[in-house]
Image: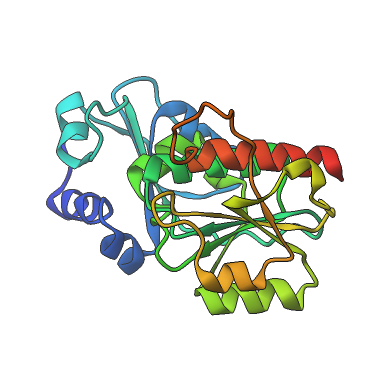
Amino acid sequence: MPWTNPQRKWLRELQHRKGREKHGALVVEGRKAIAEFITSGWKPLLLATTGASLGPDCLEVTARDLREVSSLDTPPDSLAVFAWDDLDPRPDGRVLVLDRVQDPGNAGTLLRMADWFGVAYILHTTGTVDFGNPKTVQASMGSLARVPVRYATESEAITLLQSEGRPIVVADLDGTPPSQVNWSPNVALVVSNEGQGPSQAWRDAATAIATIDRAPSSRTESLNVATAAAMLLYEAHRGS
């Protein structure tokens, strides 16, 4: 059955940050990702699919219906809307801080990294892409459903981490090799906007600045932020 006019308006609003904030909800597309959210305890406000039913009250729609309300180039066969669920931070573990990370695909990959390495929470600072962005949700492959996220300005984030007694390791191009960093079990790793690098405030707050060694012949200006985070989270995981 086609969308009702209110449903169509609602779903289109949810494709934008203001709409997600207004309604306190996000869209998840793709059968596997939807299953990850449901399994993790998120409650669907709407389920729709062109294929086999996803559960009670699931709407049967056409591919055209999905294209009308999706921001993805090739919408999957299923769509769900979930009320935004703020997960409680885990009691132990590291923190991954996203400092003005603006690419939605990178943000989604960083959520997967945080899920893989079991961070206590991600600290989302002002200037970082909205985690409800459809491309971020898609790139997270369901990890957004499991990783606790806290939100703060830069100054609030620094104060919070210091109040929790966390060493702050900032990734940058000019610092200490990861093998020489003291990766305590409660460390906070800060990864920043690739073009701008960490702010002076983060550099001043850092207990260490970690730099991934490059080959002498390398002419690459920087590593992809998600790639760098994966390497440093592995070092932190191994080092503690």
Return the residue nearer the eye: 220 or 36.
220
Residue visible at 50% across and 33% down? 141
Return the residue nearer the eye: 97 or 40.
97
Q: How many marks?
A: 0
Relative image position of residue 31 (x, y in whole percent):
43, 27
Residue 208's place in the image compared with 158, above or below, is above
Return the residue nearer the eye: 234 or 44.
234
Q: Quadrant of residue 179?
A: top right
Residue 49's place in the image compared with 25, above or below, is above
Colouring method of the image: rainbow
Which quadrant holds the C terminus? top right
Residue visible at 30% across and 60% down? 17
Relative image position of residue 76 (x, y in whole percent):
32, 26
Relative image position of residue 19 (x, y in whole percent):
27, 62
Residue visible at 64% across and 36% down? 213
Relative image position of residue 8 (x, y in whole percent):
17, 48
Question: From the viewer's perspective, is 191 left or right of 2?
Answer: right
Which quadrant holds the N terminus? top left
Q: Is residue 82 visible?
A: yes
Q: Quadrant of residue 220?
A: top left
Q: Is residue 1 visible?
A: no
Return the residue nearer the eye: 82 or 119.
119
Question: From the viewer's perspective, is 5 left or right of 106?
Answer: left
Residue 201's place in the image compared with 57, above or below, is below
As drawn, the residue found furthest toward the front would be: 216
